[in-house]
Image: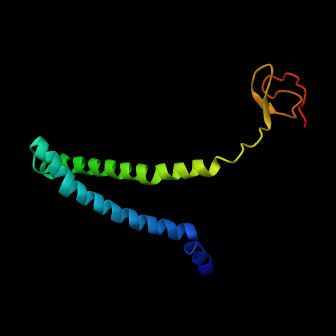
Amino acid sequence: MISDFKKFILRGNVVDLAVAVVVGASFNSVVQGIVKDLITPLIAAIGGKPNFADLSFKLHGSTFMYGDVINLIISFLLIAIVIFFFVVQPINKLQTLANRNKQAPESTDRKCPECLSAIPKAAKRCAFCTAKVTPLTK
């Protein structure tokens, strides 16, 4: 059982995932700092409120700190933008370049002449409308 656990832990994708979590947590801290120390004061200079974290309201004796939520939403949007433009877009571009010379696999299906459902090329009868069809063979 211990050897199986060692195999699992030392598998490449588990280690990659662990590294990604650590780097992601560090990146999150950086973005939180940028939002708290740069973006929020910039927005506050325009809007007039010096600190979003202090924004709150009271309802039946409970205090709702909605300023913190605003900071977290800004942080989330920044992280999503960075991941989209610096991770997702480049990977999509690389996949497009890698797949441009590959030919699409030949289809094994055809359309039934009666109901236009997809049926295998070798079918003698449509599975959907039961119409007789001539098998296509190469």
Give the tally of numbered discs: 0
Q: Residue at x 40, y 68 (%)?
A: 22
Q: Residue at x 29, y 62 (%)?
A: 30
Figure coloring:
rainbow
**Left or right of 84 in this view: 32:** left
Of residue 60 and residue 67, the one placed in the foreground of this image is: 67
Of residue 66 and residue 88, the one placed in the foreground of this image is: 88
**Left or right of 110 in this view: 38:** left
Q: Is residue 48 visible?
A: yes
Q: Quadrant of residue 34?
A: bottom left
Q: Residue at x 59, y 50 (%)?
A: 97
Of residue 12 and residue 4, the one placed in the foreground of this image is: 12
Q: Residue 3: x, y in percent?
A: 62, 80
Q: Residue 47: x, y in percent?
A: 12, 41
Q: Residue 107: x, y in percent?
A: 77, 38
Q: Quadrant of residue 6?
A: bottom right
**Is the residue 122 above or below the residue 98 in the image?**
above
**Left or right of 62 in this view: 122:** right
Q: Is residue 56 visible?
A: no
**Left or right of 57 in this view: 112:** right
**Is the residue 48 above or below the residue 123 in the image?**
below
Q: Quadrant of residue 112?
A: top right
Of residue 113 and residue 93, the one placed in the foreground of this image is: 93
Q: Residue furthest bottom?
A: 2
Quadrant the N terminus occupies: bottom right
Quadrant the C terminus occupies: top right
Q: Residue at x 39, y 66 (%)?
A: 23
